[in-house]
Amino acid sequence: MGKVNIPENYQSCLSSYETQEAIGFIKNLMQKKLCMALKLKRVTAPLFVDPLSGLNDDLNGVERPVTFDIPDADTSAQVVHSLAKWKRMALYRYDFRVGKGLLTDMNAIRRDEELDNLHSVYVDQWDWEKIITEEDRNLEYLKSTVNRIVSAICNALDEVKYQYEHLDTELCREVSFITSQELEDLYPGMTPKERENAYTKEHKTVFIMQIGDLLKSGEKHDGRAPDYDDWKLNGDLLFWHEPLQCALEISSMGIRVSPQSLDEQLTKAGCDDRRELMFHKMLLENQLPLTIGGGIGQSRICMLLLKKAHIGEVQASIWDEETIKACEKAGIELL
């Protein structure tokens, strides 16, 4: 059963018609701004991949992919969880050069997602990936890229507010960077989610770095697959979301694994069996370009900019009966 939080006296800033119009406006606008900010070209991406290719993202390693058979091809396929690894292979296959990258619409089904105001089984992201040099594999380059993304989001908000004058969303352009270990040291008695909320409430726009490895406590801040982000050079972008009074994660991103960091992380994660998959073999043999990339939630961006209290207000999905009734009673219109 899903969990739903109904903010007291919540009322959408936009009518149903304006909301639908604004969603389209935001998605077109953000695509253009991201391409300009990061030097990206839009490409077409798959909805499903061959399970034996090693291209599907296993997220935290426990989520079950949606699998189906294709009789005429005498094979089966998996609906993607994300395109983290596919994008890097695409840059190689499409002959992209250093400093250039791709952007695509990523749609996925995450059947094991816990449903609440921010999570749905339907996922829609702008997935992007860009080729970098060995010299770019550092925290300063990562921070610079994060600042570009935040500027694109804030600039988009300015145009949305010009279009809808009664919309009063405010975002902070200044990003506060902190590592997951520094966050644990700052709030040792809290859970990772509580730490995120406490820090983001104070700083408004936050990038939490170095996610995936064990902290001093012996726990992880959050799970990360070992074969796409370098755990020393990644992070999550969070904005403070006034309607729900919580940190809203907009993007998970990072500088991708090198052959050396992939080797280390596969062993740490107990995933050495992946070394024989096509993607992993190519990466370990240094055949794939060095990249940076991430996913930016389309529905999350719409929630943030339009001050919506539930992700179901900006995307069509399936919800449990209790959530539907609670939202209907509160005047929250689920699509």
Image: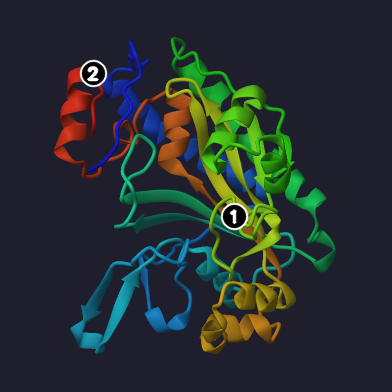
Q: Position of residue 268 (x, y in %)?
A: 63, 73
Q: Nearer the viewer, mark 2 or mark 1?
A: 1
276 shown above or below 309: below
Counting every numbered tag in the picture gives 2
At x 35%, y 19%, the residue is: 7
- Residue 192 visible in the snapshot: yes
At x 45%, y 14%, the residue is: 167
Where does the N terminus fall, quadrant-wise? top left
Question: Is 70 left or right of 40, judged from the image as shown?
Answer: left
The Cα atoms of the two marked residues, 2 and 1, are separated by: 38 Å
At x 67%, y 69%, the residue is: 257
Q: Position of residue 30 (x, y in %)?
A: 52, 39
Residue 282 sits in which quadrant? bottom right
Q: Position of residue 146 (x, y in %)?
A: 68, 43
Q: Position of residue 126 (x, y in %)?
A: 49, 50
Nearest the eye: 113 or 288: 113
Residue 233 sits in which quadrant? bottom right
Query: What element does badge 2 sit on?
Result: helix
Q: Residues within 10 Å of mark 2 (few under 14, many from 20)?
A: some
- Residue 148 visible in the snapshot: no
Which residue is under mark 1? 219
Which residue is under mark 2? 330
